[in-house]
Image: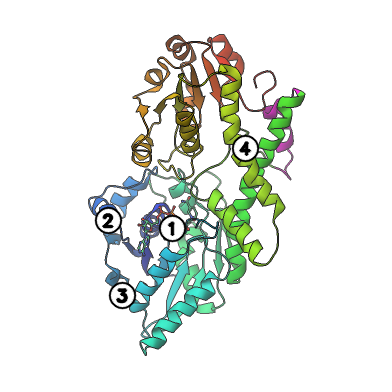
Amino acid sequence: MSRKNLKVCIVGTGYVGLTTGVCLAGIGHDVVCIDIDEKKIRMLKAGQSPIYEPGIEDLLKVAADKLSFTTQYTDCKDADVIILAVGTPSAKSGKADLSYMEAAVTEIVNYLHGEKFQVVVNKSTVPVGTAQRTEMIISSILHKQNRQANFAVASNPEFLREGLAVHDTFYPDRIVIGAKNTEALNSLRNMYAPLLEQTFAAPKACPRPEGFPLPALITTDVTSAEMIKYAANSFLATKISYINEISGLCEKVGADVTEVARGIGLDKRIGSRFLQAGVGWGGSCFGKDTAAIINTGLEYAYEMPIISAAVAVNKRQRSRMIEKLQESLKVVRGRTIGLLGLSFKPDTDDLRDAPALDIIRYLVEMGARVKAFDPIAMPNCKAYYPELAVEYTDDVLQLASGCDAVLLITEWDEFRRLPLEQLAERMTGSKVFVDGRNIVDPGVAQEAGLLYIGFGRSGYE
Ligand code: NAD
């Protein structure tokens, strides 16, 4: 496939926008990243990443001559492709709040013109109909301004995982493009050609996995593309909630959910990923995307009982953590409880909808003294809960010191190799260890002197 380098403008330089920006620059395009957050842009101009994402700072250096950062939309001028990657958080109703999207769209219109074909791409996760609405907003503004532009709107949902964002962008399973306009489709196919054909030189910070197969390109209509993203996230959230529901029954009947998950996961129709029972999912996407798809259903008077149940089970898992603490400690008030891990998953500083946030709040409300340790996310937690008296510590041993119970919330790799005996030595009372991710060997923990409690693990519930 012959290809040319494009001028790409990315609006919204967060986890998705920044990663997309550095990777597209890394494969040769000229990229401008725009954000309204001046602090973010200042940091990026100084070569620092405002988010913790492995590999991203190296790539900022490597792709520096192809990449620029600005708060000025004027830099969208002459872009071949304008990618919208702003946040689409949940409104109170559960619907996706599209106000950031619409604000961005009204700005970019000023830089659409008739001199060349330009594609506006919805990369943010947005409900069905948003591409059509984006087109309508643009057309009506152009009409008011008595101008014309040669543009099309496409949907190109993003599937990267935080903590692996750079990897997932360079080496995706698939790229989905929803467009009714062939020129738009061809432009995006051209933009992604180096990824689709894997012809780019793999960066040192993110080498190509051995035997990596070429990514699939799915070209479809915009509505199906918009649905694919919500269907994917709802499915993943449901898979986790499914094993969590099974884990509760394992506790009742005396089975071990880790064995059950292994036994079912080896069936290729099921697969072993997303079958780890524990305190449940969190993050910026699953909660808001399940809420949004349920809401889309409601607009059509169509209930989605499976996804609704997945949400309810997930909420129950966070409460189960507290119940396990109550069952083991009896009285929680006045006890010292340590949280191992705060971010919603390892290798990220992202705290959005992290189980740790609810758990901290429950514990404080119950009158416990709360200590915490996370390798990366502590500054974000301090900023999120400035009013709560959480004691942040420097390492796992300082965390354990004086704790009646330690709750493992995030499966950071270093927590898989905890110095359990030293932890137990520093703890007090019955030395409860609640493993919210089932990553510690119960026998080894008991031997070290801890009262081990897992999720759905026979004899250790
Ligand atoms: P984010 O909050 O990290 O980044 C959004 C950025 O947009 C912020 O920096 C914000 O300042 C900026 N912004 C808001 N309004 C703006 C405007 N009018 N002009 C310019 N910049 C503006 O969000 P994110 O995690 O990158 O998510 C972005 C979208 O991608 C969401 O729809 C999300 O659901 C989707 N998504 C996220 C992930 C993920 O893992 N984070 C994965 C796939 C899809």
Which of pointers 3 and 2 indicates the residue nearer the eye?
2
- Residue 87 badge: 1
Percent coordinates x, y for residue 447 in the rendering: 57, 9
Name the amino acid, label 4: Arg
Q: Secondary structure at mark 3?
A: loop
Q: CA distance from mark 1 to mark 4?
A: 27 Å
Q: CA distance from mark 3 to mark 2?
A: 19 Å
Reading the image, the residue beneath label 3 is: 77
Reading the image, the residue beneath label 4 is: 316
Say whether residue 251 is left or right of residue 438: right
Q: Are marks 1 and 3 in contact (CB under 8 Å)?
A: no
Specify the quadrant that holds the C terminus: top right
- Classify mark 2 as within 8 Å of ligand 1 or not, answering yes or no: no
* Viewer-side residue, 143 vs 347: 143
Q: Earlier in the sequence, mark 3 or mark 4?
A: 3
Q: Secondary structure at mark 2?
A: helix
Which of pointers 2 and 1 indicates the residue nearer the eye?
1
- As drawn, the residue found furthest toward the bottom would be 146
Q: CA distance from mark 2 to mark 1?
A: 16 Å
Q: Earlier in the sequence, mark 1 or mark 4?
A: 1
Say whether residue 374 is left or right of residue 281: left
Q: Earlier in the sequence, mark 2 or mark 1?
A: 2
Reading the image, the residue beneath label 2 is: 41
Q: Residue at x 73, y 36 (%)?
A: 264
- Classify mark 1 as within 8 Å of ligand 1 or not, answering yes or no: yes
Relative to 392, does residue 347 appear above or below in the rendering?
A: below
Percent coordinates x, y for residue 156 in the rendering: 51, 64
Q: CA distance from mark 1 to mark 3?
A: 22 Å
Quarter of the render that holds ligand 1: bottom left
Relative to 402, does residue 307 appear above or below in the rendering?
A: below
